[in-house]
Image (cartoon, helix red, strand yellow):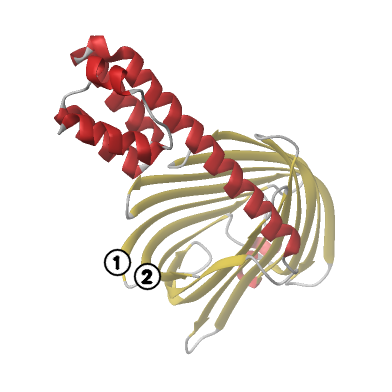
Amino acid sequence: MSKVRHGLLALALGFTIAPATVAAQSLPEPVLAMIEEAIRQGDAGQVDSVIALARTTNPAAGTELDTLQEEFHRRRREQEAREAESREAAIEAAGPLELWRGRGEVGAYRNTGNGSNVGATAAFQLTRQGDEWEHRLTGRFDYLANDNYDRTQFLLAYRPRFALSDDVFSFGLAQLEADPFQGFDRRYSVSGGLGYRVVNESDLKLSVEAGPAWRYTELAAGGEESAVSTLGTLDLDWQVAQRLKLAQDASAYIESENSSFTSVTALEAGVGGGLIARLSYAVEHDTDPPGGAEKTDTLSRFTLVYEF
């Protein structure tokens, strides 16, 4: 039975082993079953771990295990190469409105600082990932209405990235935001520079960016300001568990007059039906805000997210 299973495993991997070799170095059936299951799942790390364990209990079958391991990785490399070619062909053939993926969210927020209120919030993000280029569109809209006043604040941003190597990329940024309670009706930001992927694992991603920036501000009290600054950003995504993710986004505009710092910490949990519950806490700080506004605003948001 063990020989039969060995033959089936070899056939599944696309190679044959001489019968004499199988007879001389046949692995026990439970070991073969364990290797079969690891190969079926396709996790390279798991396959290597299982085969490493098999070596300790079956030292005489080292050559046989080497063959199994090498053939698995060869087949995996061939499959990855085919998938990469197929992906590149799809990207080249796609039109500008294709290959976009996105997410939308709606919910409520509570702010402190320049007011203490509860309002409605909505956001979207669209991303198109190419072989070298990545395009990202984001938007957020917060609205509050009560007997005393209305508060509307929003942010729209376009951020392209171009891969220079596996870890280094260039980026651009065009952004429009409005928040009269922080002293400005409109604030336009343009930036570009270099970024680096500090960590780029399947469950943990961390990247940083830096470059010069220019901001033009239309003040709520009248008048306008423009300034050259330095922009730095941090983007962290950690998949803590299958349905639990922690995200941290931070940015800083460093200027001689008024520097701005933003931090958003979010926890996301899958709730089923394609929906994600998101709880986030944002801190926005200006060192010298216009119009006598408070320097620090905080916003706590609870939203439901749908990815498409």
- SS class, disc 2: strand
Above or below, comparing residue 227 to residue 201 in the picture: below
Q: Residue furthest bottom?
A: 147
Drawn side of residue 288 relative to residue 267, left or right: right
State the residue position of label 2: 275
Residue 99 placement: quadrant: bottom right
Residue at 60% in and 41% down: 81
Amino acid type of the residue tagged 2 in the rendering:
Leu
Residue 221 placement: quadrant: bottom right
Above or below, comparing residue 233 to residue 146 in the picture: above
Residue 223's spot in the image, x, y percent? 83, 68
| Cα distance between the residues tagged 1 and 2 | 6 Å
Asked whether 9 or 194 is in front, the reply is: 9
One can see residue 119 in this view = yes
Residue 125's spot in the image, x, y percent? 58, 66
Q: Which mark is residue 271?
A: 1
Residue 71 placement: quadrant: top left
Residue 102's spot in the image, x, y percent? 56, 67
Neighbour tally class for label 2: few under 14, some 14-19, many 20 plus, Cα within 10 Å = some
Residue at 29% in and 39% down: 8
Amino acid type of the residue tagged 1 in the rendering:
Val
- SS class, disc 1: strand
